[in-house]
């Protein structure tokens, strides 16, 4: 049953794969394999006999062709039958042929054994085996020459006057030296021995190559598609067979590239996959948009065919398009987040001989900024602080391995430790601080307002004020889209940090404060992407809070590079907003991750909706309605014009919040009230307990102040 199914599958492709599979399943094939050495020996001995007969036949045929009439024969010359001469010569020479063969055959077999001709397998025949064949053929030539010398003398050739009656008396046969037949014998023998082994090797390789080869549909009949199909046709080791192109340019329909025809457009993909029995779809459009990617992936998913793509244009800058650089469709492809082009020469010149301090350097964004900065050899020092021991250890080990020339200093320290921060800044005297340290897990912080406020608000105040005391040139606050119209404590604390840094910028002559705001980053610690991936690996279900919930997404390297660029745009007091593209439904994200894992949504892996978590909004915003957006020299970086707040009021509330956080009995009601006063746009949407013991839950409603 399995054999018939396999034959039916192969019959859809071509004759040779079907033939080889059928041949492979025959009983006689298995018997031949089990007696391979005996069959090889029999073949080689037959090859000796055939080569010997061929050598004599060539000599005899040549002798007949070179029959010369020494005298003028007139019209009789046309009546000579050369075929009759050939057969007559065979009749004359059959005895010496057989006599010499009886001597050559056993001697040649001993030579075969002596040189180890039967130690290897024909299906693995190689150059070494061909070398052995050359040796045994040369020895065969010597053996043939000696044998002929013993049995027939120096020359082969006789007068035909007395032997063949229809040849005129004046005719004679040209004489040939014995070594000519010996050379011919060795050439024929080498050809017969090697051709059989090469045929078996070719058959084995052909079966291996085309028995499991994949039929490929290539999306995109442009330059990348041309290079890809050329590589597919040229490189036999990959076992891919380009069946057809598809391209949305109707002018290309019906045209051929390297013999592969353009047969339709993207919308025809399911039909084309079925028609050509495709096993794989390759996207050869490096500039394809996320919408185009999603279309192709959806069609391939419905057809149950895997899909791969080439890297982006910038990854193909060297001009080489090869199947070796094909990769699976990634989440970034579907979300439209592609690597940005960072002006590294400008970044290097601005960071040259500078000491850089990164807070929260063990986190997702902080660690990536650390990698980007460490790759610049011209910096003086890179100082990383984090209060998570393991994260700090991990980034320390990674950077020391990948950037051994970087002057790296890692410090286990909390940003709320003012004394520790003072000692650190006095020791290293940084020129630039990237403040990425913050607690960011929304549901976790909703019931721990003191922890969120003390770290995100008080910690920011400590590091910012001490930066001024240490004459730091620039201070970059890493903010979040959750700071816009916040509905949770985390977002409100980040908005409070924005207010403080903006206000503090007006009270310093040296340090310039800049804020960079952006949305979610893919694969960050605690985000939905690693959560969904883990749930998929466990077999589901994938949990989504709400069918309509949306979020902005950006890759970690993209965000980090844009932060570096924004750093040198600001002169102080600005809030830069990174272009996050279009918001993405979390349900769509879950569906695509399930599909990319090769699973079927709601069949293999189910999606369940659990309801919004504390402090969670259906959608996020990157800027306020009253903020004016202005373009910058960099396309993906926008600048906002925000309303100015009285810094004395901000500082006063900051002081009150810090005192409350340091009291023995924390009053959560008062903390939330002060936070609401500081961030008036904060919309409280959670229950707050009067103290940290979580014994009772009381809904809080505060009026705008």
Image: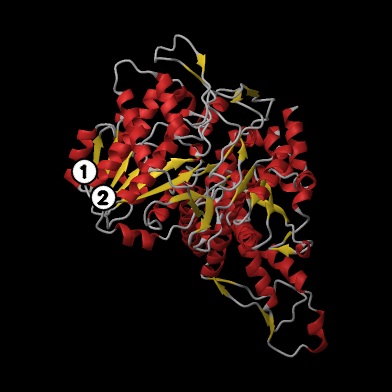
Image coordinates of residue 571 in percent, x first then y, are 37, 57
Q: Is residue 394 among what the camera can see?
A: no
**Mark 2 near mark 1, Cβ–Cβ under 8 Å?**
yes
Q: Secondary structure at mark 2?
A: loop
Can you say whether 229 is above or below 85 in the image? above
Quarter of the figure with residue 251: bottom right
Name the residue carrying label 2.
472
**In front of the other: 615 or 356:** 615
Q: Earlier in the sequence, mark 2 or mark 1?
A: 1
**In front of the other: 239 or 357:** 357
Name the residue carrying label 1.
425
Q: Is residue 230 among what the camera can see?
A: yes
| Residue sitting at x 26%, y 50% | 472
Can you say whether 491 is above or below 470 in the image? above
Image coordinates of residue 342 in percent, x first then y, are 44, 57
| Tally of numbered discs | 2
Image coordinates of residue 41 in percent, x first then y, are 56, 44
Q: Secondary structure at mark 1?
A: helix
């Amino acid at each position: 049953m399995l054999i018939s199914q396999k034959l039916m599958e192969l019959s859809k492709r071509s004759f040779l794969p079907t033939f080889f599979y059928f041949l492979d399943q025959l009983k006689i094939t298995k018997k031949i394999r089990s007696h391979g050495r005996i069959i090889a020996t029999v073949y080689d001995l037959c090859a000796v006999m055939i080569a010997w007969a061929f050598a004599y036949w060539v000599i005899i045929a040549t002798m007949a062709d070179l029959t010369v009439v020494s005298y003028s024969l007139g019209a009789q010359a046309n009546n000579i039958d050369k075929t009759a001469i050939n057969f007559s010569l065979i009749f004359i020479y059959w005895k010496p042929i057989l006599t010499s063969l009886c001597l050559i055959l056993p001697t040649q077999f001993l030579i075969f054994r002596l040189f180890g001709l039967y130690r290897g397998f024909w299906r693995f025949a190689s150059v070494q085996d061909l070398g052995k064949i050359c040796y045994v053929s040369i020895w065969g030539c010597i053996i043939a020459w000696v044998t002929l010398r013993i049995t027939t003398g120096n020359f082969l050739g006789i007068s035909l006057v007395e032997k063949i009656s229809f040849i005129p008396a004046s005719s004679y046969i040209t004489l040939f030296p014995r070594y000519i037949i010996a050379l011919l014998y060795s050439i024929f023998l080498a050809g017969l021995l090697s051709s059989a082994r090469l045929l078996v090797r070719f058959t084995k390789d052909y079966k291996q190559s085309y028995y499991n080869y994949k039929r490929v549909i290539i999306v995109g009949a442009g330059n990348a598609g041309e290079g890809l199909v050329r590589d597919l046709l040229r490189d036999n080791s990959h076992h891919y067979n380009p069946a057809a192109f598809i391209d949305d340019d109707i002018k290309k329909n019906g045209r051929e590239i390297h013999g592969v025809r353009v047969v339709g457009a993207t919308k025809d993909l399911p039909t084309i996959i079925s028609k050509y029995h495709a096993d794989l779809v390759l996207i050869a459009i490096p500039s394809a948009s996320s919408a185009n990617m999603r279309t192709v992936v959806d069609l391939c998913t419905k057809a149950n065919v895997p899909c791969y793509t080439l890297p982006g244009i910038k990854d193909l800058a060297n001009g080489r398009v090869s199947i070796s650089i094909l990769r699976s469709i990634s989440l970034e492809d579907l979300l439209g987040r592609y690597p940005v082009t960072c002006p590294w020469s400008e970044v290097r010149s601005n960071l040259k001989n500078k000491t850089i301090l990164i807070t929260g350097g063990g986190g997702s964004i902080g660690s990536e900024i650390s990698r980007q900065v460490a790759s610049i050899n011209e910096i003086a020092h890179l100082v990383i602080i984090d209060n998570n021991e393991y994260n700090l250890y991990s980034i320390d080990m990674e950077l020391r391995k990948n950037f051994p020339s970087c002057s790296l200093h890692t410090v286990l320290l909390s940003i709320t430790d003012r004394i520790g921060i003072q000692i650190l800044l006095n020791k290293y005297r940084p020129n630039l601080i990237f403040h990425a340290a913050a607690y960011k897990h929304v549901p976790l912080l909703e019931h721990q307002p003191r922890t969120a406020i003390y770290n995100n608000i008080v910690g920011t105040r400590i590091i910012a004020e001490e930066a001024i005391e240490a004459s730091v040139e620039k201070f970059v606050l890493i903010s979040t889209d959750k700071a816009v119209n916040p509905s949770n404590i985390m977002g409100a604390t980040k908005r409070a940090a924005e207010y403080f840094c903006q206000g503090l910028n007006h009270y310093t002559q040296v340090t310039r404060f800049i804020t960079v705001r952006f949305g979610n980053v893919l694969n960050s610690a605690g985000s939905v992407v690693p959560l969904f991936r883990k749930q998929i690996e466990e077999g589901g279900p994938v949990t989504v809070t709400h069918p309509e919930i949306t979020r902005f997404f950006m890759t970690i390297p993209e965000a980090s590079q844009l932060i570096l660029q924004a750093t040198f745009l600001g002169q102080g007091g600005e809030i830069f907003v990174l272009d996050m593209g279009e918001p993405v439904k979390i349900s769509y994200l879950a569906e695509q991750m399930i599909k990319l894992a090769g699973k079927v949504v709601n069949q293999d892996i189910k999606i369940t909706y659990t309801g919004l978590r504390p402090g969670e909004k259906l959608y996020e915003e990157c800027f306020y309605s009253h903020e004016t957006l202005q373009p910058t020299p960099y396309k993906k970086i926008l600048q906002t014009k925000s309303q100015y707040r009285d810094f004395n009021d901000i500082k006063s509330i900051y002081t009150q919040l810090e005192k409350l956080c340091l009291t023995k009995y924390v009053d959560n009601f008062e903390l939330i009230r002060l936070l609401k006063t500081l961030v008036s746009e904060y919309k409280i949407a959670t229950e707050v307990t009067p103290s940290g013991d979580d014994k009772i839950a009381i809904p809080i409603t505060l009026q705008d102040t």
